[in-house]
Image (cartoon, rainbow, N blue to C red):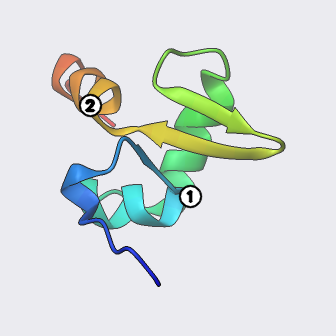
Amino acid sequence: MTINVPVWEKYTLSIEEAAAYFNIGEGRIRTIINENRTADYVMWKGTHAQIKRVKFEKYIDSVNVI
């Protein structure tokens, strides 16, 4: 049985999902993560970064340029 959760209801997003959701390129999201590795909107699952959706939304709201 597979449970499909809509991206707007997920707590964390993969880089690919975040790129589609926020309409930002994967490369730019990876750059933001690498420049802010300890930010509260990044969760590490081993070597894979997960984006905390609501916290990243707040970060996006607080900046003028991405």
> Can you tell which quarter of the image residue 35 is in?
top right
Amino acid carrying label 2: it is Val
Question: Looking at the rendering, in which quadrant would you find the C terminus?
Answer: top left
At a point 32% along the width and 50% down the height, the residue shown is 10
Which of the two discs, 1 and 2, sits closer to the camera?
A: 2
Name the kind of residue labelled 1 in the image. Answer: Gly
Q: Report the residue at 16% width, 25% height from top.
A: 61
Left or right? Give the position of 59 relative to 30.
Answer: left
Q: Position of residue 36 (x, y in %)?
A: 60, 21
For disc 1, the marked residue is 27
Instruction: Name the disc covering residue 54, or none.
Output: 2
49 sits to left or right of 55:
right
Q: Position of residue 19 (x, y in %)?
A: 39, 60
Distance, label 1 to label 2, CA atoms, is 20 Å
Q: Residue at x 56, y 58 (%)?
A: 27
Residue farthest toward the front in the current orientation of the protein: 1
Q: In the drawing, does residue 24 fall left or right of residue 46?
A: left
Q: Is residue 24 above or below residue 1?
A: above
The quadrant holding residue 3 is bottom left
Given the current orientation, which residue lies at the most extreme right position?
A: 46
